[in-house]
Image (cartoon, coloured by chain):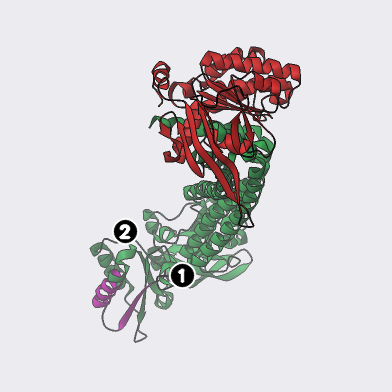
Chain colours: A green, B red
Amino acid sequence: MKRLLTGMVGAVVEARAELRIHRMRVLLSLVGVGVAVAALTSVVGLGAIAQQSTVESFERSGGRPATLSAQVYSETGQPIATDAVAAAVDVAVERYGIGHSSSSGSIQQRVQFADGVSGVNLQLVGVDYATIHRLVVTDGAWFADGDADRLAPALIVNEAFWQRLGSPDLRTHPTVRLAGADGATAVIIGISTGVYSDPLDPAAFMLREAHERIADPAQLAGAQLAWEFWVPEQSAEDLTMALKRDIAGSVGTDVTVDIYRSDFAAFNDGEDPLLPIKLIVLGVAVLILFLGALSLVNISLVTVRQRIREIGIRRSFGATAGRVFFAVMMESVVGTIVAGAIGVFIAVLVVENPQVQQLIAQGATDLPPFPIEAALIGLGASAAVGALAGLLPAIVAVRVRVIDAIRY
Amino acid sequence: MHGVPRRHRRVRRLTVPLLSLKGVTRSVRLPDASILDILKGVDLQVDVGDHVSIVGRSGSGKTTLLNMLGLLDSPTSGTIHFEDRLVSKLSSGARDRARGADIGFIFQQFNLLQGRTALENVMTPLLYATGRQFWRRSSIATEMLDRVGLADRMSSMPERLSGGEQQRVAIARALVRGPRLILADEPTGALDIETGATVMRVLDDVADESGAALITITHDANVAARARRHYRLDHGVLSPLDARTPLAAPTVGAVL
């Protein structure tokens, strides 16, 4: 035990002295490792951001996992009793304790702009829609529960819509006239990214209940009836069956209710749709690290040959083979871990740089913090590279013939 | 071994010789499959406080003998006892530790570690010690450098020291763990006569003070003359150099 402790401390002292004395060589050999680890960690870190950005863009279109989409349409062509369907949905939501649900149909709404009337894609949604689809409100606020009762319906528009109005300040409660629909006036309360529409086309969100109040019956009859439910992934399948049964059962036989999972996680038959990205990231990272390790092994092998005399001297003063092996390994590992830590630090600077994030993340809302696993992978990889790169020279060092090394 | 008070060790040494070689041979197989005998039946017994010199021409087997004495190599046949321990029975780790604790090497080319100060060089062997020697290595090494008269050169790098000073650092390093056997391989080979004499005086004094046995391998008749017993190594055969030394002396043997 005593020998183990002094052995450990002694090896650290030796390695430290070695690093101090051969500063230049060590520095040069570790630059490669530091750069490799910085690259590896950056790639893993940026990969996490890119992945989050991809996930969010999937979620924006299809909803978060697991989102169930319900489409309700008439078999006979007769108008559907919208209230009855909405009531059936509410009952089902209540019964199964579904936390987030929203209607999600859309219609074409004609809107009076300063330069004329244009058709606008109007999505009829619920309050929870923004949560389910991760919508970002860039200005103003999303709908609140009381907004359905406003006399002038609240409207959340996309950037194109807002610009077409002349980019009014939302604090002035800008309004817009909706053509048809008894010429109702809507108040714009927020600006948000659209979901399905082309970002260059004006589009808007309105609460479905608010729309029902202003819409004429003909327009209502043509409206697509759809709902979305955000449910736990493990119960998605059961709930799909249960919701379909409940809603269909309470709205009559001439109405068809179709429910399916619309989020990205359901598309690939359980396969991770992000797997290709992950594999590419991993491949690049491993390649970078391999190149860094190669240069390190190269330099360590050359230098251990130069150090054979010194190793011989140490052996003559009682350094055991194990101790010499450990010291050479240790030196390599300590060096690469320090280089790795610096590499990780550089990677953090790169990954957390706002410009880089903007470039990679492309509008992701929940940017992950610097992934701790990336830092750990970086440090772990640098230690592993150090151990591997130290192994060959350490074996050479142990095989030194002491007196020959010293005398010649 | 560690932790045994030095006084107790001495008592034991009175009964058992420090190092004893009996019929030691060493052969190597050459590439053409013939066998080359480097050492041929070497008998040597070294006691505590002994001072032995071995002279021999190049190729006489001095290096191989040094390997044997320093527990760095095993004989092809014959036995080596370090005190009462049969060296061939020791594990390589135990041999390394015994070497660290009990044997100090001094080389012709000094072999100081470059880039390290005199003090750090002297501290090096203590890195392989345990207990007090390890933890107090700095003060022990300082004291040792003081003893060889280099108190003012502690933080000098080897290349800033003269040859004589470097060899004194090497002596301090060889003696810092209080070895019981000092192996000096051509200790004055790289020094001028005067410096060599000074260094040998220091070595003798320090060895005497510590009670360690000293084996000097040398070409230099003056250096060899300082020893009490003299041997010649010739073609692998170790024989007493001085014909007047009785062959039947209990501590000396040379067998063909």
Q: Tag 2, which secondary structure?
A: loop
Q: Are circles 1 and 2 on residues that touch, CB within 8 Å?
A: no
- How far across and how far down the image is residue A15, in percent? 56, 35
Q: Is residue B54 visible?
A: yes
A128 vs B81: above or below: below
Judging depth in this view, the residue of A94 and A148 nearest the camera is: A94
Chain of the residue on which disc 2 is drawn: A
Q: Image quarter for residue B60?
A: top right
Q: Seen in the image, is A338 located left or right of residue A215?
A: right
Instruction: Pick the residue in front: A367 or A151.
Output: A367
Q: Which residue is mark 2?
A: A99
Residue B65 horizontal side relative to residue B82, left or right: right
Secondary element under disc 1, as helix, strand or loop, is helix
Q: Residue type at mark 2?
A: Gly
Residue A95 in picture, x, y percent from top left: 23, 64
Tell me what residue is drawn at x 53 percent, y 47 percent. A387
Q: Position of residue A326 (x, y in %)?
A: 51, 41
* Separation of marks 1 and 2 at Cα, in angstroms: 32 Å
Magenta stretch in the rendered image = A239-263
Q: Is residue A253 magenta?
A: yes
Kindly identify which chain the residue marked by label 1 belongs to: A
**In the visual, does A90 lie left or right of B167?**
left
Residue with the most extreme right position: B192
Q: Residue furthest bottom?
A: A76
Write the residue at 59% across / 31% down: B239
Q: Identify which amino acid the numbered label 1 is placed on.
A: Ala
